[in-house]
Amino acid sequence: MRTLTLITLFAMTTPALAGDLTMDTTLGTTLVDVQAKLVEMGYEVRKAEMEDGEIEVYFIKDGKMGEAYVSPETGKITKLETK
C-alpha cells in the first residue's frame, strides 16, 4: 500500500514535466509568467527578455536547448526553435 501511495503522489506532482512545448502552448503574457510556466514544465530558463514587441526566452530541458518567442497579447508561442 505504501508503494502505491508513493507512486500516486509522484504522478500527481510531476505531470507538467511530461509536457513539451508546441506552437499551441500558452505560456503567459509577461516575462515573469513565461519564465514561471517554463520552470513548472521542467525547463531551465537561461535568458528572457522583450525583443521586437515579443517575449524571447532561451531554455534547456533534457540536455536540449531551445528558443521561443511569445506574444504578450495572447501568451501563445509565435516561434519555436530547438537545437
Image (cartoon, rainbow, N blue to C red):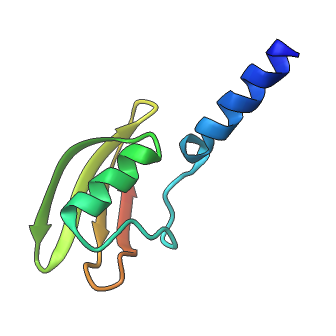
Q: Is residue 51 left or right of residue 13?
A: left
Quadrant in the rendering for residue 67: bottom left
81 on left or right of 8 = left
Dividing the picture into quadrants, the one containing residue 39 is top left
Image height of 61 relative to 72, above or below: above
When the figure is inspected, residue 55 is found, relative to residue 60, above or below; the finding is: below
- Of the 4 image quadrants, the one containing the C terminus is top left
- Residue plotted at (49% across, 68% down): 25
> The N terminus lies in which quarter of the figure?
top right
User: Residue 49: x percent and y percent?
Assistant: 12, 60
For image coordinates 20% across by 63% down, the residue present is 31
Most extreme residue toward the top is: 2
Of residues 82 and 21, which is closer to you in this image? 21
Looking at the picture, how far across and down is residue 52, in whole percent? 11, 78
Residue 35 drawn at (x, y percent): 28, 53
At 35% across and 70% down in the image, what residue appears?
79
Residue 12 visible at all: yes
Q: Which residue extends farthest right?
A: 1
Q: Residue at x 37, y 58 (%)?
A: 81
From where the camera sits, is residue 82 visible? no
